[in-house]
Amino acid sequence: MAAVTISADARQDPRRWWALGALVASMLVLGFDMTILNVALPTMAARLGASTGEQQWMADAYVVVFAALMLPAGLLGDRFGRRRMLMAGLGIFLAGSLLGTLADDVSLVVVARAVMGMGGALVMPLAMAVLPALFEPGERTRAVGIVSAASALGAPLGPIIGGWLLDHFWWGSIFLINIPMAAIGIAACLFLLPETRDPASPRVDAVSTALTAAGLGGLIFGIIEAPGRGWGDPLVLGTLAGGAVSLTALVLRERRMTRPMLDLPLLRDRAFFLNAMAATLVMFVLSGLMFVLPQYLQAILGNDAFGTGLRMLPMMGGLLVAAKGAEPVVRRFGARAVISGGLVVLAFAAILGSRTGIDSGYGFTALWLSVAGLGFGFAVVPSMDSALGALPVERAGSGSGLLMTVRQVGSALGIALLGSLLAAAYTDRLDTEGLPGPAADAAGDSVVAAHGIAER
C-alpha cells in the first residue's frame, strides 16, 4: 500500500486533541441521530399525518442508504483523500439536516433522512481512518476508545435530547441540532486534520453499490408496504423479487471480482459468521424495539416526548451496565457462553414484552426494558469482539466493513419487519364501527392517528 506518510512532528502537534474533539462531536451526532428520530416519530406522525409505513420509511431511509454506501465510502476516502471525503460527508449530513428542518411533508423527511444516511456513511468509517495520521500507536488505542465511546454515548442521549427539543420547539428541531455540530466538524477537519490517501486503493465498484442499494431497498419496500397493500399485491411481490434478484446478482458479481467490495468468503469462517449473525440479531431486535416503543409510551401511556425519552433509559442503562461488565464475565465463562446467555436473556425480555398490554403500566415495561438492555449488552459486545478477533490480520479492514454492513442490514430489517408486524396486528384488531369514513381511514393509518381521533 502506498499510503501517505505523516511526520512525527504532525503526530505531536498539540492541535491533534482539538481535532479529536471535532471527531468526537461528529460521532456523537451520528450516535444520537440513530435514536433521536424514534422518540419524535409519534409527534411527526401527528403533525404530518404519517401512516405507520411512512414512519418506517422515515426511520429506515437513513439505515438503508447508510448500509449500502458505507463500504464504498471507505474506498472513496482511500482514493480521493480521507480528510476531503470526511468533510464532504459532514457537508452532506449538514445538507440533509437542513432539508429535514425545512421539510413540511413526509416525502421530504424521507429524502432528508436518505441524504443524512449518505453523509453518515462517509463520516463513520473515515472518522476512524484518520486517527493513525494524528496519533502514535501508544496514543491511538486511547483515541479509538474515545471516538467509539462518543458514538455509543449518543444512543442513550438521543431520546432525551429529542424529547426535550420536542417539548420546547417544533419537530424540525431534532434535525436543526445537527447543523452547528456538523459545521464545527467541517471547520476542524479543514484546519486541524492532515490529508491522507492510498493511491493503490481499488476503484469504487458502482455496479455493486447500486445492486446493494437496489436489493436492500426492494426488500425493505416490500416488507413495509405489505401490511397495507397485502402480500399478494403485484407491487409488493415485484419489489421483493427485484430485491432478491439484485442481492443474488451482487453475490455472483462479488465472487468473480479479484478485489471485491464485500469480502464474502469470510462468511465461510464459522467463528466470524456465527458472531456476526449474533451481533446482527441484536441490532435487529434493538432497532425494531426502538421504533415500536415510543409509540406505546406516548399513544398508550400518554407520556410527552421528554417523558418518553426518560422512560427509555432503563433499557439503555441495562445495555451500558452489561457492556461495561461483559469483559470480566467473558474472561471467566468464555465468549460463547456469555453471548448465548445474552441472547437467552434477550429472548426472555421479548417474552415479557409480548405480555405488555394497555393496563400493564410503566413499572412492568421498565422491568423488561432493563432485562432487554442487559441481554443486548452481554450479547453484542463479546460477539463483535469475537467476530473481529476471528479475522486474519491482512483482512481486518474488509472484515470489519462487512461486519458493520450486516449490522446495519439487521437494523433496517428490524424496523421494517417489527413495524410491519405492529401495523398488521393493529389493523386486524382495530374497531372503527361508528366512525365516519374519513375518521375510520385515518385511524387505520397508525396508532398515533387513532389516539388523536379518540381525544377529539
Image (cartoon, grey):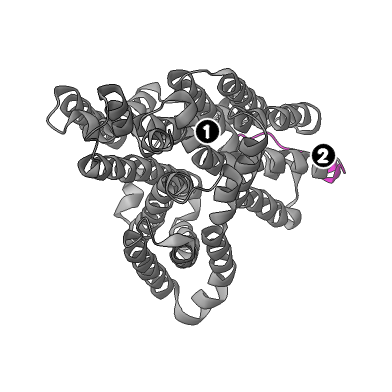
The residue lying at 45 percent from left, 48 percent from top is 290
Where is residue 345? Give x, y as percent: 39, 70
Where is residue 119? Give x, y as percent: 56, 28
Where is residue 16? Give x, y as percent: 81, 42
**Counting residues from the N terminus, which is met first, the one under dot 2 or under dot 1?**
2
The residue lying at 55 percent from left, 58 percent from top is 316
Q: Quadrant of the C terminus?
A: top left
Specify start and end residues of the magenta stretch as a single range.
Answer: 1-14
Q: In the image shown, does 29 or 295 lie closer to the viewer?
A: 295
Q: In the image shown, does 316 or 160 lie closer to the viewer?
A: 160
Answer whether residue 334 is visible to the viewer in this image. yes
Residue beneath label 2, please? 10
- Of the numbered discs in the image, which one, if any, rests on residue 322? none
Q: In the image shown, does 331 or 135 lie closer to the viewer?
A: 331
Q: CA distance from mark 2 to mark 1?
A: 27 Å
Answer whether residue 128 is visible to the viewer in this image. no
What predominant SS class does the magenta segment belong to?
loop
Query: Which corner quadrant of the image does residue 184 belong to?
Result: top right
**In the image, is residue 268 above or below residue 110?**
below
Near mark 1 (Cα within 10 A), the count class, few <14, some 14-19 or many ≥20, is: many
Compared across the picture, whether 196 is left or right of 50 comes to right
Query: Which corner quadrant of the image does residue 126 belong to?
Result: top right
Where is residue 144? Give x, y as percent: 66, 51
The residue lying at 54 percent from left, 68 percent from top is 322
Q: Amino acid at mark 2?
A: Ala
- Of the numbered discs in the image, which one, if any, rests on residue 121? 1
Compared across the picture, whether 425 is left or right of 199 comes to left
